[in-house]
Amino acid sequence: MPRVQPTRPQVEILVWLAVFLLLFCLSWFFHWHEGLDAFIEKHHDYPLDHALLALNMSGFLGLIYSALRIRDLSREVRRRLQAEKNVDWIACHDTLTELPNRRFLESVCAQSMSDQRAQETYAVFSIDLDGFKKINDLLGHDHGDAVLKAVAQRLSSLFPREHVFRLGGDEFVVLARRTGNPDLAALGNRIVSVIGKPFTFNGVAVDLGASVGFALYPENGDDLSQVIRHSDCAMYVAKKQGRDLVKPFVPSMQEELAKRIRVEADLRAAIRKAEIVPYYQPLVDLKTNKIIGFEALARWKTASGEFIPPNEFIPVAEEAGLIVELTDQLLRRACTDALSWPNELVLSFNLSPIQLSDRLLGLRILKILGDVGLPAHRVELEVTESAIIQDAVTARIVLDDLVNAGVRIALDDFGTGYSSLSQLSNYRFDKIKIDRSFVASFETNDKQDKVIKAIIALGAGLGVTITAEGIEEESQLQRLQDLGCDIGQGYLLGRPAPAEMLAADHVSARLSQRR
């Protein structure tokens, strides 16, 4: 047990008692009382007895006052010590969940480095909540705080004798001691299962998931802080691959994470410098062989002349929270370019799936159209089935606002989603786009051919325009025209090109010669 140091008031009381006992003993041994009585009797003409009585009473009152002051000082010292403890606790704990925070974790890592005793073996779990941002956006931060508290309680119950940390936002870390050879993947799945149990706040059901990565100490790193970084790396890989996944750390993940960090940094700089620009691919009416519009496709050309594929930087933009800024920038640029086109040409523009969970999306799009001066009926926004499924309520609000303003909506990648027919009945679409995976093989695959026939017939029955994308062969074009497909798009009809290289008349003429 550590030795407790006495406080100053306690020391002063002990000193006072020691002086009192010393004076008492001296008075008793030397008979000071008899001498004092004789002195007073000898000088009875003076009121010495009254002066001594007043002095004794003043001393007694002073003693009482001193005792009260010492008591007050003791209380003040206790309050100050408690306040210092509270400050230390607040500095090392998250005030919302009351879990240890990053500073506490850093102190644990530092202690593990300086501890000369036999090292403990740990499993480090990094946990990131799936769907938490949507809870904050749709239900408000009060519900978000309640969810974080509930998650903290669930993790603490699952690991009652281990350290559970909240590092900020929706990120948690569990530092679990290992004994024997535990099944860590199964433990990670228990974390996912516990967090994934339904939440209900004020009658509102909340759906939440978790991505979990784990690493071992000392197997996966020389020090604990390095192992934590590795578990975080594994968590990022799990989050990138889907929802409610558990991934162990493997060394190859470091290279992927380092690449992702570089791409994100470069992406931020590219957005800031407006280096990502729209290229335009023609949309051709297969009945008249005329271009009816262009689809804007994001293209990123680096300073070295290298093109970064959209399937690499778009997911990074979504994960890093850059997709809104990037989309607004590209849409504004595309609308400005479209002003120079003939009035009958349409601008087609893709929306990221995660953006349909943003209730303000419609307002931002309409503001851009108003700022640029492009009529709403000349804009066609492409959305995927998966985007609508993720948040059907918000998607309906956003799409209805846009449709009511005159914007056209196209259902992209038709047939590859979850519930195509239900989406057609629930939403107002102007166009259906047949996914390129069907077009690529429908000439040699009888089932694919029948699927395309059915989609074209469905569009005709619903009065919805059908577009086939990914047309790269003359035979594909001929077959789609014979089936009555409305619009075509693909390398055969025109490759994506920057605005200054568009040549609508040239492409149209080329197509006429081909026919």
Image (cartoon, helix red, strand yellow):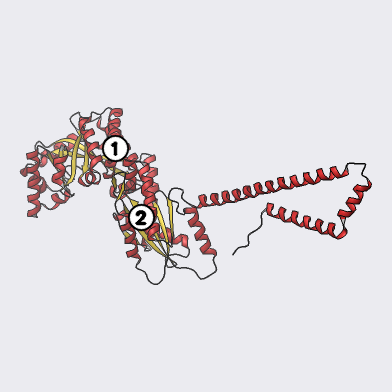
- Residue in the foreground of this view, choosing between 278 and 432: 432
The 10 Å Cα crowd at callout 1, few under 14, some 14 to 19, many 20 or more, is some
Residue sticking out furthest to the bottom: 180
Answer with left or right where residue 18 lies relative to residue 336. Answer: right
Name the side, left or right, on which 168 lies relative to 394. Answer: right
Q: Which circle marks residue 359 in the picture?
A: 1
Residue ID at (30%, 38%): 330
The residue where tag 2 is placed is 236
Residue 84, visible in the rendered structure: yes
The reply to whether discs 1 and 2 touch (Cβ–Cβ < 8 Å) is no
| Nearer to the camera, 334 or 434 | 434
Residue 430: where, in percent of width, then height?
15, 37
Q: Alpha-carbon neighbours of circle 2 within 10 Å: few (<14), some, or many (≥20)?
A: many
Query: Whole-Å distance between the Cαs marked 1 and 2?
Result: 27 Å
Give me the residue at 43% from left, 53% from top: 166
Of the numbered discs in the image, which one, if any, rests on residue 393? none
Q: In terms of sequence position, does the residue under pointer 1 or pointer 2 come before the other? A: 2
- Label 2 is placed on what type of residue? Tyr
In front: mark 1 or mark 2? 1
Amino acid type at circle 1 is Arg
User: Residue 46 at what x, y percent from top left?
Assistant: 91, 41
Give the quarter of the image for residue 221.
bottom left
Q: Quadrant of the N terminus?
A: bottom right
x, y (%) of residue 317?
Answer: 33, 46
Q: Position of residue 353 (x, y in %)?
A: 26, 44
Could you tell me which quadrant the C terminus lies in? top left
* Position above or below: 424 against 189: above
- Relative to the observer, which residue lies in front, 326 or 154? 154
| Closer to the camera in the image, 19 or 491 | 19
- Label 1 secondary element: loop
Q: Is residue 401 above or below residue 222?
A: above
Dot 2: element: helix
